[in-house]
Image (spheres, grey):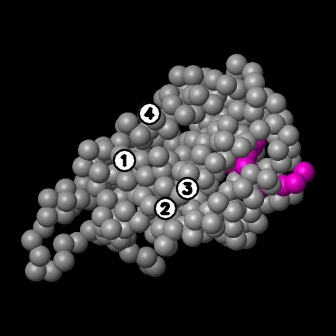
Amino acid sequence: MHLFKKKNWVVPKGQEPTEMDRKILFYQSKGHLVPRRGLILTPGQIDGIRKSGVINTACLDLVAENIKEGMTTNEIDKLAHDFIVKNGAIPACLGYNGYPKSVCVSINEEVCHGIPSDDIVLEEGDIVNVDITTILNGYYSDASRMFIIGKTSPEKEKLVRVAKECLEVGMKAAFPYCFVGDIGNAIQRHAHDNGYTVVRDLCGHGVGLKFHEDPEVEHYGRKGTGMLLVPGMVFTIEPMINMGDWRVFIDEDNGWTVVSDDELPSAQWEHTFVMTDNGLEILTY
Ligand code: MF3
Ligand code: CO
Ligand code: CO
């Protein structure tokens, strides 16, 4: 017995199918995973996410100006929290599934979800991901960047650079009516070409009206697989690139922080994008 029926794309009764309807119905008939109507946002909703993204980006800029050796990760949390609230917005992470802080700060072998603390002090040579999600008028925007504290090793510097390139090649691989797997495939190739691996346990996600939503944007995979991406869909790409093995574990002490199994460094960059008729537009620039 089926408890859930796969939702099919249907043209509302009495309505002529649009160009988009025809294309989605075509891919659906070929057996592809297609979005449900609710994942295709209106221009007004996209504009709301863009405005949320302006605050989120300004917050990351503020972190960029202030982050330095000797600072605690809790100071970064407070800086970001106060900025977001002062701008009439809400830090989405705070209280999300019980998460205790407003942002994530992940250092070196920490892959993501590092919890800010008074006891964690940034040191020369650290590579640090700061991941911030802002809610403005109900609209979510989600982005993260890497920061290098002082001077680091050439190896870590290259990892940070290649991880950024992975986000860029993923972005460029996307076009209207492509598949999530086209993005993942491009990212995986670039990572492997540079001797790195791609974390598989966490992925990008639909975002905008909720924090985490379909589609699941895996950062590895085969072209032509995964959900069809059509204009109006909003989602993140956020590849986590490891210097060593792709496997990760969750810190048992806090139940959140994801760490590389071999404890070699990891780097991640993230943007929120909208699919347009010409490809992806960044909403967190
Ligand atoms: N911002 C993260 C993402 O990119 C999610 C963090 S959830 C938290 O999806 F609870 F850890 F903050
Ligand atoms: Co995200
Ligand atoms: Co994020």
The residue at the point 67 percent across, 25 percent down is 157
Q: Residue at x 79, y 60 (%)?
A: 255
Mark found first going from the N terminus, 3 or 1: 3
Kind of residue sitting beneath label 3:
Asn
Residue ID for mark 4: 169
Q: Which residues are magenta?
A: 105-119
Any part of residue 42 in sight: yes
| Element type at mark 3 | helix
Q: For the residues carrying marks 4 and 1, which lies nearer the camera in this image? A: 1
**Label 1: which residue?**
281
Question: Among all residues in the image, which is located at the extreme top?
Answer: 154
**Amino acid type for the residue under numbered disc 2:** Ser
- Mark-to-mark CA distance, 2 and 1: 15 Å
| Amino acid bearing label 1 | Glu
* Secondary element at image label 2: helix
- Residue 4 drawn above or below residue 230: below
**CA distance for labels 3 and 1:** 16 Å
C-alpha distance separating marks 3 and 2:
6 Å
In the rendered image, residue 239, in percent from the top left (x then y), is placed at: 56, 42
Q: CA distance from mark 4 to mark 1?
A: 14 Å
> In the rendered view, does 64 fall on the left or right side of 249?
left
Foreground: 201 or 59?
A: 59
> Nearer the viewer's eye, disc 4 or disc 2?
2
> Mark 4 vs mark 1: which is more N-terminal?
4
Asked whether the beta carbons under mark 4 and mark 1 sit within 8 Å of each other, the answer is no
Residue annotated with mark 3:
56
Ligand 2 closer than 8 Å to label 4 CB? no
